[in-house]
Image (spheres, helix red, strand yellow):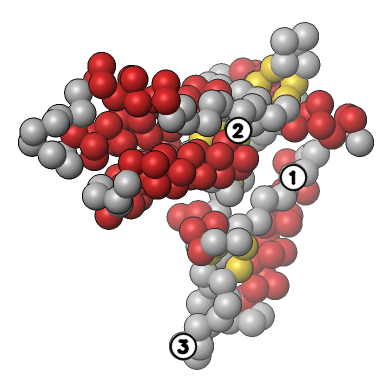
Amino acid sequence: MSGDVHVRFYERLGVRLPRATYLVMGFEDESDARRMMLDLKERLAKFGLALHEDKTRLLMFGRYAAERRAERGMGRPETFDFLGFTHYCGKSRNGRFIVKRKTQRKRMIRKLKELRLDMRKRMHIPVADQWQWLSAVLRGHYAYYGLTGNYRAIKRFLQEGETIWQRALARRSQKARMFMPRFLKLLRRLPLPQLNIVNPYRAAHAR
């Protein structure tokens, strides 16, 4: 996994340990979750380690989270970020509970920033090469983030990608500016990959 999906533990003696992956644990009973939290802290303390307090929390999540929080006079169920997605409680079209995922906001911002920088480096390469590179970036993005319920986020990524490309082309020459009408003609000749959505629940049932 990439470094941005990891947390770091620190050891008292100053030795930097290997990065540990984010861990998400689910419990049916709140008491079990709290007991596990205490046991985990005690266990890590024996090795001079500690949980990152700002990144460790207990939250009510799952099929009955909404009604249990309502009984306590609380708002909607909390969300959590994991592996680039924000996970939240939702329902399918037939009213069944499902865990929904959308692209994490910070991850989206960072990816678009990287895309702008990478496109700037490729500003003066042939247009066909730019198209091939951007197409590969989009296909990779769809392959990871193209899940049911995340259509808006990946559509935004596609739209931002088109805008970034158009602006890079517009800066290439003062004589032949790439204004939007001309860019749309280019997209008809060199179309970018369209959105690809995968339903993970349907795929799981098909196995």
Ranked by sequence position, the earlier of labels 3 and 1 is 3
Where is residue 151? Give x, y as percent.
55, 23
Where is residue 172? Give x, y as percent.
17, 42
Mark 1 falls on what kind of element? loop
C-alpha distance separating marks 2 and 3: 41 Å
Q: Front-most of 179 and 41?
A: 179
Residue beneath disc 3: 14
Residue at x-position 25% and y-position 48%: 123
Q: Amino acid at mark 1?
A: Gly
Q: Front-most of 187 and 77?
A: 187
> Based on the displayed image, in which of its 4 quarters is residue 204 positioned?
top right
* Mark 2 Cα-neighbour bin, 10 Å: few <14, some 14–19, many ≥20: many
Q: In the displayed structure, would residue 169 be above or below residue 125?
A: above
Where is residue 6? Give x, y as percent.
55, 62
Residue at x-position 8% and y-position 33%: 175
C-alpha distance separating marks 3 and 1: 32 Å
Q: In the displayed structure, would residue 163 be above or below residue 128?
A: above
Front of the two marks 2 and 3: 2
Ranked by sequence position, the earlier of labels 2 and 1 is 1
Residue beneath disc 2: 146
> Is 119 positioned to the left or the right of 135 in the image?
left
